[in-house]
Amino acid sequence: AARLALQEYPDLGEYLSVEVFRDETAGMWKVTVEAYVDYQSTYCYRDIYLTDSGETRLLVYEGPIGWDESRK
């Protein structure tokens, strides 16, 4: 799921953190990618929702978020 999700955003850079969640009831995967934005010294987040068959259903972008801020 993480490899498929990262294909949606191929140019994120080197400083990534990836978390993977699974909802068995819905048959969906949620992959959260945290990317460091060097020129802004902030983080941006991307949530990619995939079906069990690997089809992308939803892309969510949030950022930039400072180190002292939390996600909504």
Image (cartoon, grey):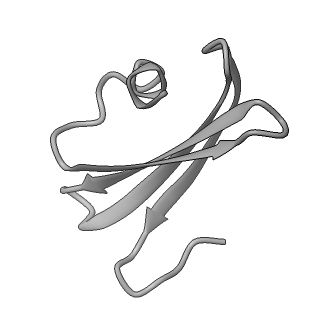
Q: Is residue 9 left or right of 59 when viewed as pictured? A: left
Which residue sits at x=50%, y=58%?
Answer: 63
Q: Residue furthest right?
A: 25
Q: Position of residue 52 (x, y in %)?
A: 67, 21
Q: Position of residue 17 (x, y in %)?
A: 31, 52
- 1 or 57, which is in the foreground? 1
Quarter holding the C terminus?
A: bottom right
Q: Is residue 68 left or right of 29 when viewed as pictured? A: left
Q: Is residue 72 visible?
A: yes
Q: Position of residue 48 (x, y in %)?
A: 59, 36
Q: Residue furthest front?
A: 24
Which residue sits at x=20%, y=56%?
Answer: 39
Which residue sits at x=38%, y=23%?
Answer: 3
- 44 or 39, which is in the foreground? 44
- 57 or 23, which is in the foreground? 23
Q: Position of residue 35 (x, y in %)?
A: 32, 51
Relative to 57, say whether 25 is above or below.
below
Relative to 44, say whether 30 is above or below.
above
Q: Quadrant of residue 38?
A: bottom left
Q: How many marks?
A: 0
Q: Is residue 39 left or right of 46 when viewed as pictured? A: left
Q: Is residue 54 left or right of 36 when viewed as pictured? A: right
- 39 or 33, which is in the foreground? 33
Which residue sits at x=41%, y=18%?
Answer: 7
